[in-house]
Amino acid sequence: MFTRILLYIIPFLITTYACSPDFEEGFIYDNVNGYTLNQNGELIEFEAIAVRDGKVLGTGTSIDIVTEYPNLERIDGEGNTLLPGLIDAHAHVMGLGIRELDVNVAGIRSLEETLETVRQFAEENPGREWITGRGWNQVLWEENEFPTAEDLDRVVPGRPVYLTRVDGHAAWANTLAMEMAGINRDTPDLQGGVILRNDDGEATGIFVDATMQYLREVIPERTEEDYEQALELALEKMARYGITSVHDASTGSYEWALYQRFADEGKLTTRIYAMIAGTGDTFDDMSADGPVYSYADDLLSLRSVKISADGALGSRGAALLEDYHDDPGNKGLLFYSQDELNQMLLKGASAGFQMNIHAIGDAANRQVLDAFEFIYDELDNQQELRHRVEHAQVVALNDISRFATLDIIASMQPTHATSDMNMAEDRVGSERIAGAYAWQKFLEQGTVIAGGSDFPVEDVNPFYGLYSAVTRQDHHGMPPEGWYSEQRMSRTDALRAFTLDAAFSAHQDDVTGTLKPGKHADFILIDRDYFEVPTSEIWQIEVLETWLSGNNVYQQ
């Protein structure tokens, strides 16, 4: 395992430090096919960009920029396309890095291949007390059924195994892990969670949402070295794929301190907009001095809170108003009562924090909208906090307009639609699907959509998200016309979701999100023209360089 980690860290160190040129007086990146947006979201093209002290001086034609700034060193962009740095408005930074340390079973299309991957990892890591990992998705398997503890027992009988589902809202454990957690037929379900059981009432090995905590309590804590390596790996991946800013959905005290230390040491190569994990003890600790609007010249910010109202669609934990179409009698799980959620939002918003609430199902989205209505009645000037619904995935048609009425941002992840299209309509039926992944319905009413990925649930590469937004197809071009193609975005709207509107959703549209003079010089150079290539190639775009505040943090 040490060898694998080292091989990841060495390229990170090389690309982050060794290839960063020293432009003390600033520079002009010339001969580029540049695109940015103005503050109204309109597309602007340019041939050169001038940078000084990490900020944009101006963009325009090569003649105009060179004439205005004749003393700046010129870099030849060789005609490559230059875009503002991309912003992922909903992701899990440490989750991305930790996945690199654990067994990764994402995207595997059969139960047996998944088990073989787990077996090999266990064999290659004999010193690991627990085998942990993430990514399984039973919907991809021919069986299309939840696996069992006995399946894992066949490949790792002598050590506990705990594997999180791809969406992070269910876990799969083997028998030894359940024994160590004290799980038996009398172990109760918890509010907001359920243990799947067989006909005899025994736990099958699948734990949905809140009940995952039974297992987590007995898994050994990660070491400080684990977390440092995980953050290094996550930063390397984000820089490689052109992400210059990320909104970290659920940040704890330890992670925040680690981010600050990396920023202080000059090792933070992506801006992090942190969401405090809930309004409990962690919030009390992290919010004691109020919101942190900017730390280390906008590298860090701590002014929002993440709460989850329900689970995920794939594990049937998303809370629906009516039964699951493919599971009669099951409406999913609301994590809190209406009053509990109201009071949580009131606590965070009263302290001046933006409230970002995970809601997948239509029942959860309605509950969250009701909670926002409650705090709007209780508190003044709430629109200034730019509250958000994270995912807004399945929304009752008559609730979509409430996003506009309440001025709520829809933080949505385009790849969720193309990953879920193989099961979403099975889950909700042909009528409710009209309010699912309904990007155009939100855009047409003026709702801001902040684009993200939810990595490591989805791939970290933001061009996958831009492709999904524009085509609503998988990487094989299926379905040919796009899945409910009337809801797809234009290329400009998709780029706006991953730049200007993502920055707006973090109160950072005055410092990043576009290449307007005075903003941070966060930009990327890519290998083809995002606006001109066939749509089928958007997901194949590669990042050649990533620049953060005028510093080259990645070079292919």
Image: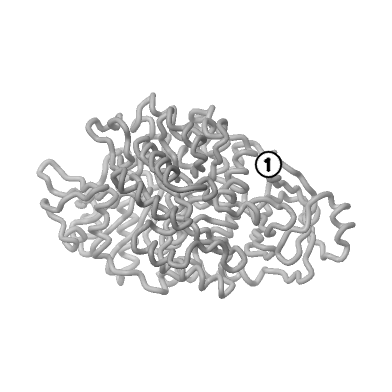
Quadrant of the rendering where the N terminus is positioned: bottom left
Going 24% across and 48% down the picture, which residue do you hit? 191
Quadrant of the rendering where the C terminus is positioned: bottom right
**Residue 268 seen:** yes
Tag 1 residue: 40
User: How many numbered tags mark residues here?
Assistant: 1
Residue 72 pos. (x, y %) = 83, 65
Placement of 480 over or under 458, stated as above or below? above
Residue 289 pos. (x, y %) = 47, 67
Going 35% across and 43% down the picture, which residue do you hit? 312
Q: Nearer the viewer, residue 338 or 160?
A: 338
Q: Residues within 10 Å of mark 1 (few under 14, many from 20)?
A: few
Going 39% across and 55% down the picture, which residue do you hit? 347
**Way the structure is coloured:** one colour
Placement of 352 over or under 36, stated as above or below? below
Residue 160 pos. (x, y %) = 23, 62
Q: Nearer the viewer, residue 469 or 502?
A: 502
Q: Secondary structure at mark 1?
A: loop
Residue 422 pos. (x, y %) = 40, 34
Q: Amino acid at mark 1?
A: Asn
Q: Nearer the viewer, residue 509 or 326?
A: 509
Placement of 286 over or under 312, stated as above or below? below
**Residue 473 seen:** no
